[in-house]
Image: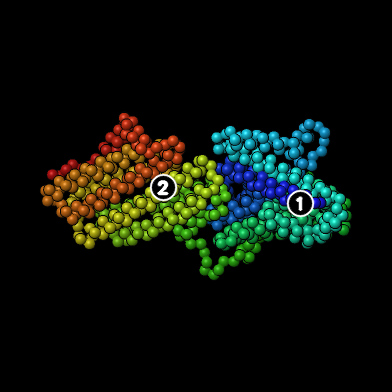
Amino acid sequence: MTIFNVLTLIGGLAMFLYGMNVMGNGLEKLAGGKLEKIFERLTSNPIKAMLLGLSVTAVIQSSSATTVMLVGFVNAGIMKLHSAIGVIMGANIGTTVTAWILSLSGLNGDSFLIKMLKPSSFSPILAIIGVAMLTFSKNDKKKDIASILVGFAVLMFGMDSMSGAVAPLKDVPEFAEVLLWFKNPILGVLAGALLTAIIQSSSASVGILQALSATGAITFGSALPIILGQNIGTCVTALLSSIGTSKNAKRVAVVHLYFNIIGTVLFLTVFYLLNPFIGFSFVDGVVGAKEIAIVHTIFNLSTSIILLPFIKVLEKLAYLTVKDKEGEGNKDNIEEQFKLLDERFLQSPSFAVEKCRELTNRMGEIAKESIDMAMSICVDKYDKEKAEQIAANEAAVDLYEDRLGTYLVKLSSRDLSAKDSQSVSTILHVIGDFERISDHAMNMVSVAEEKQQKDLNFTSQATAEVKVMCSAVRDVLDIAMEAFEKHDLELATRVEPLEEVVDKIRTKLKNRHVKRLQTGECTIEMGFVFSDLLTNLERVSDHCSNIAVCLIQENDESFDVHEYVQMLKNSGEGFDGQVKRYSEKYALPAKEF
């Protein structure tokens, strides 16, 4: 085996890993976060959990990715540890699908059908189709499908390159002698675990073993412990991912490790205890890619079936390993909510976008609560506790903006679909509007405090008028928030007419205030307070308009804000009709002067 064979082997491994990555990313983007949403709704039924883990891992072709995802879910409080254990078991079975696909390279036969089933025959066809779709298609879903096809083709080319590079080893006596070492189960397990830990993929390490099996020098006795060790090595990814997470998230990674260690010990113990008595004739037989896939599947399937009734034991073992400190518990505070912004979710952009939307909705609810309380203490009776709560809410909203903004910037640097990219842009704008709405609530607190300290009071006429404007602002805020939460474009179009009515109310109130000044019913000092309150209320309405516009813009790439506003105002009966209805609903009380 020459240096050029070694270079070909390394290049083949690089192609294999790259192809697997491209294919996995394509599958994830095509799923559009649906897989993660299914996880999120997972029931506590262990059998359903196992089947789900099997299905998802078979689709994304990586048990490590599934387990890392689970670490993130448990860390964010989306899933319980008990439910995650069943998914881990299923993920170990699902990861065997890759080995079966790779084993197709070992098909032999002269018929056209058999030849076409070999990856070396159909991979070039998939590559041509995939490249053509990537080049000429503008549809995101078609491009994701193309990525899957190209990724699979590159993966198979990498596999063929590795097989070709190691082919000369069959004539090297020293290679056969090295393989004899791995008949020792401990050395074999360590070798498999180390290789998988280095390349961070059991599917890839099994693929390498299948490529080496093409030399005809690997026996069942040496392959078995290596395969079992590969299952242990794949746990490293989840263990690394759990660093800095909650105790329960660490327990997910520990359960994954224990599951594979216990399975390996049981499997090897049973096998080597029975062998002297039964005398398994196949131990010294040569294994190929298909046999490796069979062993891989039998191990993971049998281990899952055996340990499935002992989920509670595995859970208890995890709790004994990762112990809670005395008095430690989960606190229901704002930091717990920010666990939804888990770095692991960045690997699944569509799901990460959904989590950002959830937190943005919570941010909006806090801002809305502040506005409601601010209206109350400005117009009705001043309440110190409410003022303090608004200040606390403002600090929380600022924190939301900072955390969400930072996370969304990281998310925007990922390979996003056009839809997700637009969603990220929308959320970034909306969190800015919610933060400004909260600021206006604080400004209104200042208005209320000035009234309190200077013992200023609105006239009964002014109070009644401001209450009408408050009702309209409360309504426009409710509509804008509901439109954002439900992604309801019809609701979003109802914001601008009501916002215009709020503007008209503000103008009328200012004019009426001037009249009261002229008649001596109101003082100049009171006028400044009154004007500040109206300005803040009107600005809240403006931000609601911004939110609605962003939502509509998200669904129309050619959208222009100014054109939209002009179009609405010139749309005639539709827009004017809504303005008229809102004007009637929020009609000001009759003047008393």
Residue at far front of view: 3
Q: Look at mark 2 in the image and give the residue it sits on.
A: 430
> Amino acid under label 2?
Val
Residue at the image position 30 percent from the left and 33 percent from the top: 576
Residue at the image position 55 percent from the left and 51 percent from the top: 345
Marked residue nearer the N-terminal end (1 or 2): 1
Left or right of 359, for residue 367? left
Q: How is the image coloured?
A: rainbow
> Amino acid under label 1?
Val
Image quarter where the C terminus lies is top left
* Residue 479 location (% of width, % of height): 37, 42
Q: Residues within 10 Å of mark 2 (few under 14, many from 20)?
A: many
Residue at the image position 18 percent from the left and 41 percent from the top: 590
> Relative to the observer, which residue lies in front, 110 or 491?
110
Left or right of 561, for residue 211? right
Q: Look at mark 1 in the image and give the residue it sits on.
A: 6
